Amino acid sequence: MKKLLLLLAFVPFSGLNAQTWISQATGFTDPSRGLDEIIALDANTVWAKAYDGSGGGLEVQEFTMTTNGGTTWTPGVIDVGNPALGINNICPINSTTAWVSAVNPTDGTGSVVYKTSDGGASWEQQNSAGFTSGASFVNFVHFFDENVGFAAGDPANGEFEIWRSTDGGANWTLVPAANIPPFLSGEYGYNGGNVVVGNVTWMPTNKGRILKSVDQGLTWTVSQAPLTDFGGTAQSGRLAFSDASNGCLLKTVGTVYTFYTTSNGGTTWSAGSTFTGSHRLLSYVPGTTVLVGTSQAAPVGSSYSINNGLAWTPIEADMQRGTSSFVNGSTGWCAGFSTNATTDGIFRFDGTLANPTFEADAAIEVYPNPANNFVTISSQLDSYDLNVTDLTGKVVLQQSLSGIENSVDVSSLSSGVYLFNINSDNKKETIKVIKN
């Protein structure tokens, strides 16, 4: 039986809410509904996928969502035509449209992809011809916008089975084997642990490898991470990425936790060091070096790091805090457990996860945008490094700058969209710039 990656159930226990997390009711009438996936699209629109947190092992096909920042949450049922199927993941793109993948968690049969266009009131199956081989079952589905997306599974018929759509899921095309690295003997992916940032996707496997696409699932490369299995009993690992280049990996071997970082999108990793945090469910505040750590198992609570995991500051340590998702340094949510329809289930962050003296004085502007030959970077930073990449993650320009204003020559760049990554000792910001 194929194992699930990091989909653990914990029985909730009582404690006092910390001042920096505000309890919100997910709306589930059943107690102990947990959330194993939260997707915060913006400060108002958030979707979350439910699971049975009672420890009873019930297969839950439910979600909840808000369109007003969590003031109210509306739960719903994900009808995938078979109550025995487990929902692998949920991928919303706005307040009305989302996709899910599902599969029988026991034997890998019955793989399906479903879509809602009415906020989860109804669900329609897509890609009925995909994942019919007994060797493969769907691991997850992701859409980048209303048109382009893909669904990925395990090796079948000589390749990792990846289906792609460019019309919102109406039609699907199997990604050719020539576009995907060959799989190793006995290799498979996991339900969970996959990361998507912008157009870049990372998929971990049981061989400690990471399949990566920088073009919305059309072509793939592979690299070896510093571990042998992302979801094994002997060792496991969890990925998190802040942007297309920068991310981290937490490796677990028994009770030993080793922390790695990457600055080239996971192609290579740092030497690794002992993890200094207490909470090991990690997520980034997007585009920053701020990491949030949460935990539903002892030691419970949450903490954050503003320097990419080097040092940690406690938020609180008396409540179970599950998976988290942040829009920015002051807007985010983490999972809890429902008590009833009107009490608990999710927590909204109340505070700021940044250096306050820096935050107030270091606004960064890049203009004009769109640009022709030159852009001006205006900031209060004493000095910083500029790293410009295209949407595939390729570095096209690097400079070390200082002073309030700097003019940067972009005349040699082709027309398109670029990411201006600005890094100083305690500030990291990514600004999208269009080059005419």
Image (cartoon, grey):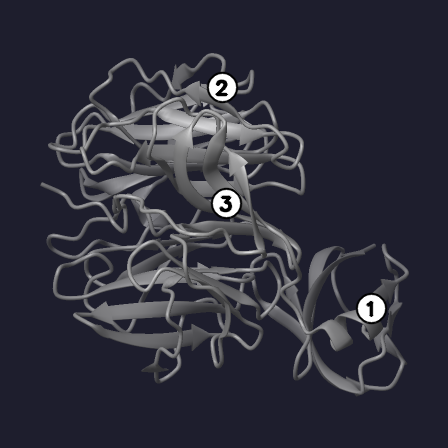
Q: CA distance from mark 2 to mark 1?
A: 39 Å
Expressed as whole percent of the image width and height from the top left, the position of residue 289 reads 57, 71
- Would you say 259 lies left or right of 414 here? left
Pick the quarter of the image with the C terminus. Answer: bottom right
Amino acid marked by disc 3 = Gln
Q: Quadrant of residue 159?
A: top left
At 83% from the left and 74% from the top, the residue drawn is 361
Amino acid marked by disc 1 = Ala
Expressed as whole percent of the image width and height from the top left, the position of residue 13 reads 31, 47
Which residue matches tag 3?
Answer: 216
Any part of residue 415 in sight: yes
- Count of numbered circles on the image: 3
Asked if the residue at tag 1 contacts the one at tag 2, i.e. Cβ–Cβ closer than 8 Å, the answer is: no
Asked if the residue at tag 3 contacts the one at tag 2, i.e. Cβ–Cβ closer than 8 Å, the answer is: no
Which sits earlier in the primary sequence, circle 3 or circle 1?
3
Q: Nearer the viewer, mark 3 or mark 1?
A: 1
- Would you say 58 lies left or right of 243 here? left
Expressed as whole percent of the image width and height from the top left, the position of residue 431 reads 73, 61
Q: CA distance from mark 3 to mark 1?
A: 31 Å
Pick the quarter of the image with the N terminus. Answer: top left
Amino acid marked by disc 2 = Gly
Callout 3: few (<14), some (14-19), or many (20+) C-alpha neighbours within 10 Å?
many
Which residue matches tag 2?
Answer: 120
Tag 1 secondary structure: loop
Residue nearest the observer in this picture, 237 or 351: 351
Of the numbered discs in the image, which one, if any, rests on residue 363?
1
At 11% from the left and 55% from the top, the residue drawn is 185
Which sits earlier in the primary sequence, circle 2 or circle 3?
2
Looking at the image, residue 264 lies above or below residue 274: above
Tag 2 secondary structure: loop
Callout 2: few (<14), some (14-19), or many (20+) C-alpha neighbours within 10 Å?
many
Looking at the image, residue 307 lies above or below residue 51: below
